[in-house]
Amino acid sequence: MSFALSYNVVLVMIGAGLLGIAAGVTGTFMFLRKRALLSDAVSHATLPGLCGGFIVMVALGGTGRALEGLLIGSTISAALGLWVVQFLKTRTRLTEDAAIGAVLSSFFGLGVVMLTLIQTMSAGQQAGLDHLLLGSTAAMLREDAQIIAAGGALVLCIALILHRPMMLTAFDENFAQSLGLNLRLIDGAAMALILAVTVIGLKIVGLILIVALLIIPSVTARMISNRAHHITPLAGVIGGVSGMVGAGISSLAPDLPTGAIIVLVSSGFFLFALFFAPARGVLASAARARKFQRRVHRRQGLLALAQGYHVHEPYTRKLLQHDGYLRADGVLTERGEDAAKAALRDETRLAYLRRNPVYSEFLSRHDGLSDLSRSFTRDELHHIDRAMETKA
Amino acid sequence: MSGAEFVPLSLTPILIGVFAAISCALPGNFLVLRKQALMGDAISHVVLPGIVVGFLITRSLDAWAMLLGAAAAALFSVVAIDVIRRISRIETGAIMGVVFTTLFALGVLLLEQSDASSVHLDVEHALMGNLESLIWLEARGWSSLLDPKALASLPPELPRLALSLVLILGLMLIFWRPLKISTFDEGYAESLGLPVRAISLGLVMVAALAAVTAFDAVGSIIVIAMFICPAAAARLMTDRLSAQIWWSVVFACLSAILGYILAGYGPMWIGFDHAVSAAGMIATISGLILGICAVFGPKRQARTG
């Protein structure tokens, strides 16, 4: 018994991991096309189809639990939902977000109506359908776990095959089209992948939270990296680890809901990236702001000293002393004299450039703070100095 | 249907449905025009962790504790979305998705971990509400509407929703001009010296107020549907904002009344002996109305040229 249980847990973990990778890869495409929340509409729109599939199967004399039937039903209703979003967006004046919200809520509402209908049909049989809202691995059968693992692997394979055309489309529609790629086909394939992720993920994560697996890994990857070919693998890894670790953690105790734990693990990755990401993170931008502050203080201090003023502001003094420009008694060192003179010379040049509109192009290359020699060539500086002399 | 049956069993749920629908549809008009329709979606998802935390802190099912918890969660999510968007410079939609799924997952986990689920606090309730159970048992017929003793036993959701509807209506009328200007032309509003960001935040807070007071009675599904569907349908009927708002109110009422009646009596007409979810049916009807407007609405096309 305990062997069977752990075998199931391992299967679920593998399945959740594969599903997470597939979701991360597919979600990145949607995210880069700025349609992240469209997958929310897709996942909610599966509910009426799930219920419809169940009702039809029961009407045909089955138990209504067969995954194939549920899959066909949810595919139909999600495809219908997508078509409605597309219709509202292209044929009416409504924007995509309103279309997404309308489809999401009304399809889900219809699904709930059908769910209550099923609950009255005959007791016992419906057990399991309402688990699909939030996912549950506690009572998962071995066949289910195997289907999930196999399905996850399949979706991942397809996602990897489609990855290149999808990325091309996400970054540059026109370029992709010029290569002869069929945009509608690629968008359609991405939708199909999202649908597959949703349906396979129903049992583990549930249809309300599956959208998290499609969004959070890609957003996290985008936080960490600016490079196109890093984002997808990163999102895949984050999604995979979240799925696997989350499923593992939730198997430790009975009241740790699998879907919620998987989502929270991926949220953990996101929070970490939010603070520590190299360029977009909180710490990085705080450090950037501080560096900028230092540069402003240093430059303003040197300018003031060059014009014979004293600097009393403690932070500026500390900075200049630290750089070796200023002695403790507030007098410039030899290096400080040079730096101050250079700063003043740059400032006069800048003032001259700003007065003459012919130089506006020239000026746009400079940030107003750093040494002019970093923005202009020596010849250009020479030219400016000459022009200033002749003017004077 | 006699008054003796209708008033105690159907009048209060219908009224509650109508009030909830209108109070969500009113701010929904502006959310749809500002391309913030999914803000309503996000807010109604974070209501779940809010009520669970409210329950865990006060250990009571008192409605006010939960309303406060939900309001705090809504406020938190709005601020979190804004702050993270500013820090990360990633598009709002994706950030919204991250924030509301995370908070919803947290709500589910807290619910399972605590004993909250044993005291009739569960995900299904938060999603679907319990409109059908908000009946008025003391009522004996239409005359009870004038009987103070019977009125005292009205479901408390009804006066609460009426109050929040009045509040939302009042705020909308008071801030009508700045709201209208900043919705259609933010740059112009700014040049007039209007506090554009404060208006935007205020609108989202009003939406949160509507979501929080409504979810308790009718569940998140109706809240999301009513934020978007009536306003979107109304947008396809007219070019004038004031007319659009009237249309959205009509559509919201129509969805609530038709939905409730169809859910309660519809299954019996076709031979089933159980009612179906009123919340789900109301959302479905609102979607159908939008569908009809999308095909026949006089202003369905974007104006060209």
Image (cartoon, grey):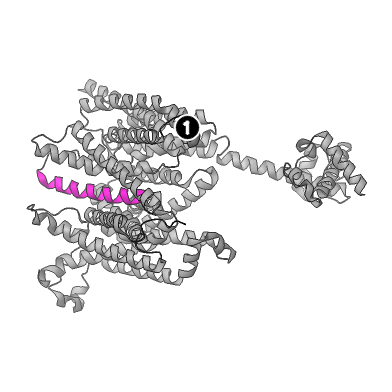
Q: Reply above or below: B184 against A290.
A: below
In terms of depth relative to the viewer, which is nearer, B100 or A178?
A178
Residue range in magenta is A99-123
Q: Tell me the amino acid under the disc marked 1.
A: Ala
- Whether residue A34 sits left or right of residue B111 in the image: it is right
Is residue B295 among the parts visible in the rendering? yes
Q: Is residue A85 above or below residue A53?
A: below
- x, y percent for residue A291: 68, 41
| In the displayed structure image, the side of residue B264 where residue A165 appears, left or right | right
Q: Position of residue B62 (x, y in %)?
A: 29, 59
Q: What is the crowding at mark 1: few (fewer than 14 residues within 10 Å), some, or many (at least 20)?
A: some
Q: Chain of mark 1?
A: A
Q: Give the image location of residue A175, x and y in percent.
A: 50, 33
Q: Residue furthest top?
A: A3
Q: Main secondary structure of the magenta part?
A: helix
Q: Residue at x 38, y 49 (%)?
A: A89
**Which residue is pictured at 47% across the width and 47% down the height?**
B92
Q: Provide the residue designation for mark 1.
A: A176
Q: Nearer the viewer, residue A355 or A140?
A: A355
In percent of width and height, residue A129 lies at: 20, 40
Q: Residue A348: within the magenta?
A: no
Return the residue nearer the eye: A261 or B8: B8
Point out the image quarter for the N terminus of chain B.
Answer: bottom left
Residue B223 falls in image quadrant: bottom left
The verdict on residue A115 being magenta is yes
Q: Can residue A126 be seen in this snapshot?
A: no
